[in-house]
Image (cartoon, rainbow, N blue to C red):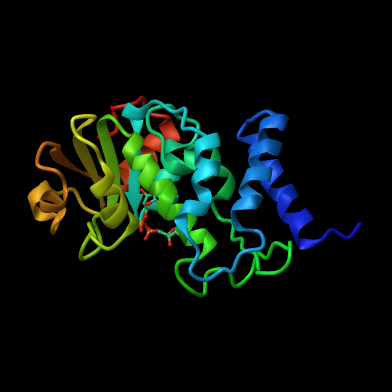
Amino acid sequence: VLLTKKAEFRETFMKKCLEFPEEKHICETIWTTFELAYVGKEKCNFSDQNYDQLLAETPFKHPCGKTMFWSKTKDLVHKFTKKRDCFFTLEDTLLGYVLNGLSWCGEKGNNETFTENCEDCLPNPVSSFWKIASTRFAQYACEGASVMLDGERKEPYDSNSFFGGVEVPNLQPPRVKNLTVVLVTEEIRACTCDSLGTLRKDLDQRIGCACKAVTKSRVETCIEDNTPCGACW
Ligand code: CV1
């Protein structure tokens, strides 16, 4: 059977939604709202507001005090949070899980869905989604939030990344009380929030900050051994 690009994309979306797992009628409702956000619209100069209804219909359900952000540590952080209830990244929430790794856009004047060359101008439907979803995810965080950063980079904290530019400014004290930076390194060493570029300055002064360096091999061991929450660093 030949499927149109949209039917094919819908299949992928539904399959991931069901395996999240989520109920079929909810996945169908979310698909309908998701599609309305970008179909028939130009892929360039896309507005974040197009996703307002989708986000309103798909509220976060994870414990807000177990929020985990990341920057340049995508594979490792997801291996760590998967099948664990210690921490939740945006990709461990329904919409983040379904849309992670996908690319989508529409075109003015037709109802088709495209999955290629959707990200060659900014803001596009994909970048807009991650920007608004990251904003809401950060606003939802409470108590102690964490972030996994790559300690092997010259600037593990980059104020221009999604984490630095979108999530840090959207953390809301006193809802959020502190941020734990998990700095993943090759060798054992010490770290402080003050040594992470402009992080301490960009973070609201009412939010406490602690940095914990942990070696990559230690994190990998924790993943293999299914080390309990809070015992890896
Ligand atoms: N976030 Br598939 C940001 N970008 C994402 C996310 C996501 N959840 N999921 C995907 N992307 P980089 P960062 C894509 O390593 O600090 C949120 C985007 O298209 O540079 O910029 C997360 O909650 C983007 O181009 O990290 C996370 O806490 C690229 O991956 C933080 O923002 C960003 O990867 C990570 O963003």
User: Looking at the picture, does residue 167 appear above or below residue 112?
Assistant: above
> Residue 221, how many percent across, how many down?
37, 38
Q: Nearer the viewer, residue 228 or 24?
A: 24
The part of the image, by quadrant, that contains residue 109 is bottom right
Q: Nearer the viewer, residue 21 or 34?
A: 34
Identify the residue shown where x is 34% and y is 56%.
162
Q: Given the current orientation, which residue lies at the most extreme front position?
A: 109
Q: Nearer the viewer, residue 124 or 229?
A: 124
Q: Is residue 171 left or right of residue 70?
A: left
> Residue 25, how many percent across, how many down?
72, 30
Identify the residue shown where x is 26% and y is 55%.
164
Q: Nearer the viewer, residue 62 or 42?
A: 42
On-image quarter of the N terminus: bottom right
The part of the image, by quadrant, that contains residue 144 is top left
Q: How many marks?
A: 0
Q: Is residue 232 left or right of residue 20?
A: left
User: Looking at the picture, does residue 40 appear above or below residue 137?
Assistant: below
> Residue 6, how many percent across, how many down?
75, 58
Q: Quadrant of ligand 1?
A: bottom left
> Residue 103, how many percent across, how many down?
59, 61
Identify the residue shown where x is 24% and y is 49%.
169
Identify the residue shown where x is 21% and y is 52%.
187
